[in-house]
Image (spheres, rainbow, N blue to C red):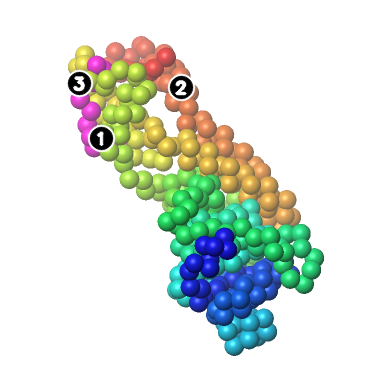
């Protein structure tokens, strides 16, 4: 690490902190490091918003952040003198906010502690130091502050070189969790449910609209969640039921080549052996599958339902995150007055797994065949893979 750093001119060093004791140990370490190279030191603190900027609470957060900036500037001057600079950023994603700040200040080395940066949002935001090390374009030094009790941080460090030297990697689950956290903060989900006895109907309706907007932005799986919940007045208040009923799964259709590829994988033979033609324009496209008109080699006209190749993985990923969320907040008394999180998750998981299993749908079609057997002008055809 030393040879790599000393072979480059280091003029600017940045360090991230949340002003916890352990995080500030990394600041002291970075100050000493910057002093060694006579470099400028930029101390950055990320404030994770709890409310949308446009709300009264959001404006109060921005006012507090301005005060935090003054305090942080004083701290930066204490540890680095005139070379110390401060920057407070309001952002739902601390890791990416620090990376962006480093790029904007054109820093040469970015320092972060390995403990005390995620706090209570760790289960959603993921491991911040590791995400920074894999996203930054500059050299990243992770300082071991986890077990240090001294005034300054332990000198056990881990260096990550630039992206050109170290292949970037961000686990999909962490990336998805980060996006969910950002959208939740953007729409103020922390205050959405409030008190169940809120007397003002307009406030309840406004909260319901914000929930719908968040679910729509989070994509098809969460839209499906809202659709499922809209059928359960036993789990949600009427204002939420009415608003969630408006959700639509706006999903781009699969391409014709994707439809053919999935069909051949499931059938085990070239699609031409079964179908004379498949209409490339779907009749409908949903979160899990889409439906196409087709003609069999026998000349029979049929409708084919094709499951999206990533549907199961996408659903399992979001269900895993929702299960963590349900475990974290489901036992809060105030929230449980409005919604039974455990029941919501169980119902959603069961419903989505049932929809993923087309064998159940085929069984239902078989039952319909038996019901309609006595009607000469009605027929139900199935094409399944054993």
**What is the C-alpha distance between the residues marked 3 and 1?**
14 Å
**Vertical comparison of 113 with 43: above or below:** above
- SS state under label 2: helix
Between 196 and 1, the one nearer to me in the picture:
1
Residue 118, magenta (yes or no): no
For image coordinates 46% across by 50% down, the residue present is 167
**What is the C-alpha distance between the residues marked 3 and 2?**
24 Å
**Rendering quarter of residue 55:** bottom right
For image coordinates 20% across by 21% down, the residue present is 276
Q: Position of residue 238 (x, y in %)?
A: 56, 53
Disc nearer the start of the sequence (1/2): 1
Q: Position of residue 309 (x, y in %)?
A: 39, 34
For image coordinates 59% across by 67% down, the residue present is 111
**Rendering quarter of residue 64:** bottom right
Disc nearer the start of the sequence (3/2): 3
Assess whether mark 2 and mark 3 are in contact (beta carbons under 8 angstroms): no
**Vertical comparison of 151 with 355: above or below:** below
For residue 217, side relative to residue 85 (left or right): left
Quarter holding the N terminus?
bottom right
Q: Which residue is mark 1?
A: 256
Say which mark, if any, is on residue 346. Answer: none
**Vertical comparison of 380 with 173: above or below:** above
Q: Which residue is mark 3?
A: 276
Q: Nearer the viewer, mark 1 or mark 2?
A: 1
Residue 176, can we see it?
no
Between 79 and 52, the one nearer to me in the picture:
79
Give the magenta part as a residue range.
273-284
- SS state under label 1: helix
Q: Position of residue 345 (x, y in %)?
A: 61, 42
Q: Which residue is mark 2?
A: 359
């Amino acid at each position: 690490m030393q040879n790599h750093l000393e072979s480059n001119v280091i003029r600017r060093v940045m360090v991230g902190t949340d002003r916890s004791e352990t995080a500030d140990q990394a600041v002291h370490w970075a100050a000493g490091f910057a002093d060694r190279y006579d470099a400028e030191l930029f101390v950055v603190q990320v404030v994770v918003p709890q409310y949308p900027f446009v709300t009264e609470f959001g404006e109060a957060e921005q006012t507090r952040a301005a005060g935090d900036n003054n305090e942080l500037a004083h701290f930066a001057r204490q540890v680095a003198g005139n070379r110390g600079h401060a920057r407070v950023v309001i952002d739902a994603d601390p890791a990416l906010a620090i990376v962006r700040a480093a790029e904007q200040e054109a820093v040469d080395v970015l320092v972060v502690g390995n403990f005390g940066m995620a706090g209570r949002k760790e289960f959603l935001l993921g491991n911040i130091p590791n995400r920074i090390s894999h996203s930054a374009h500059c050299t990243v030094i992770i300082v071991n502050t986890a077990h240090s009790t001294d005034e300054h941080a332990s000198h056990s460090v881990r260096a990550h070189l630039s992206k050109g030297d170290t292949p970037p990697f961000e686990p999909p689950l962490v990336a998805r969790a980060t996006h969910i956290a950002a959208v939740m903060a953007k729409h103020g989900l922390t205050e959405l449910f409030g008190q169940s006895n809120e007397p003002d109907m307009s406030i309840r309706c406004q909260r319901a609209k914000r929930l719908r907007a968040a679910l729509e932005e989070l994509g098809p799986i969460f839209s499906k969640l809202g659709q499922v919940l809209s059928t359960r007045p036993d789990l949600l208040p009427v204002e939420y039921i009415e608003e969630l009923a408006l959700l639509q799964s706006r999903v781009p259709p699969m391409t014709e080549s994707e439809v053919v590829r999935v069909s051949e994988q499931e059938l085990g033979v070239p699609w031409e052996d079964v179908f004379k033609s498949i209409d490339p324009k779907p009749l409908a496209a949903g979160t899990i599958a889409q439906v196409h008109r087709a003609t069999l080699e026998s000349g029979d006209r049929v409708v084919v339902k094709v499951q999206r190749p990533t549907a199961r993985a996408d659903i399992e990923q979001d269900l895993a995150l929702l299960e963590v969320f349900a475990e974290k907040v489901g036992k809060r008394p105030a929230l449980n007055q409005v919604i039974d999180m455990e029941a919501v998750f169980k119902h959603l998981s069961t419903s989505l797994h049932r929809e993923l299993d087309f064998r159940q749908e085929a069984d239902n079609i078989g039952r319909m065949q038996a019901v309609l057997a006595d009607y000469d002008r009605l027929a139900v055809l199935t094409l399944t893979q054993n």
